[in-house]
Image (tube, rainbow, N blue to C red):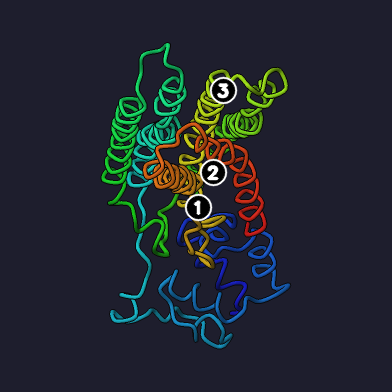
Amino acid sequence: MIFADKLIKLRKQAGWSQEELAAHLDVSRQSVSKWESAQSIPDLEKIIKLSKLFGVSTDYLVKDEIDDEIYLDEQEEDLSFRKVSMNEANEFIKVKAETAPFIAYGVFLCIISPICLLMLGGLSEYGKYGISENVAGAIGIVILLILVTIAVTLFIYSRSKTSSFDYLENEIFETEYGVIGMVKERRALYQDYYTRNNIIGVALCIMAMIPFFTGIMINENDEIMLIALLCLALVLVGIGVIRFVKVGVVWASFEKLLQEGDYSRTKKEKNPLMAAITVVYWLSVTAIFLAVSLPSRNWRETWIIWVIAAVLFPALIAIVNLFSGKKK
């Protein structure tokens, strides 16, 4: 019996379609079709994967004179991949969908955390508002730290809910019959919503600074107006981030289960999610702002850090998306 016939027999015994087998091997359905029609044969790496996948020896697969299955012994079977059931897959998608808003709103809080400090710092420069520089700085920093604390709490909570599924990201695994089809169907239904929110989110981040630069053209000497417009820009960036982080977390759950994109078997290199990159970026900006502002107490000038950060953020999004697209 030739390899092609053996592959067809084993695949049908497992109850898989060509597409499902292809997903398990991280190849195209056309590749499986060519193997089964004897137009080509897989390389050694794929032969070994097929051996582990079906629990048969490599000799059985490659030697035409061996017609009866030679199954792996118990020691070899221990090397087989973890199986993900339909219930596990559904629970993982459910948990990711539930925690996605917590992650998104946590990032939002990080982005808007300096708004109070910026506004009070600007108002303290004018005696008519009755706010001293020390009071403005103290209140602003306290509110900033409270918002960042709430955000970190949301991140920790989300992490605790999903930690039991870490193996989906870190390990190579197999899925039980029907799981691949279910995930692909749900991803197809989610596609339009995912694309729409990504477009809106990225557009908001890119256009967020338009009001600020418009204010500069109208009256660059009105510092209170400029700070207010900068705060508006941060809010718009935050709203944009909410849109693409929420859908991005759910979309990543589909890719993890399908072992595609950054979570394919050949990669498994865990390219950071946009949510993680965004969190690190804005927490870093906050840290830089405080490190520069606290010693000098010169809030009137250091707020320019947020202008630069808001301008650079869309570029960061574009670079990450471009990099991820090339890897896929």
Write down the quadrant of residue 63 in the picture. Answer: bottom right
Residue 262 in the image: state x and y as whole percent: 54, 57
Write down the quadrant of residue 218 in the picture. Answer: top right
What residue would you read off at disc 2? 184
In what element is the residue under mark 3?
Answer: helix
Residue 214 in the image: state x and y as whole percent: 69, 22
Give the residue type at disc 3. Glu
User: Which residue is drawn at the image coordinates 37% and 71% (left, top)?
Assistant: 80
What residue would you read off at disc 1? 258
In what element is the residue under mark 2?
Answer: helix
Residue density around tag 2, few if under 14, some if 14–19, many if 20 or more, within 10 Å? some
Residue 64 in the image: state x and y as whole percent: 58, 85
Quarter of the picture holding the C terminus: bottom right
Whether label 1 touches label 2, CB < 8 Å: yes
Which label was assigned to residue 133? none
What residue would you read off at disc 3? 223
Spatial distance from mark 1 to mark 2, Cα to Cα? 8 Å
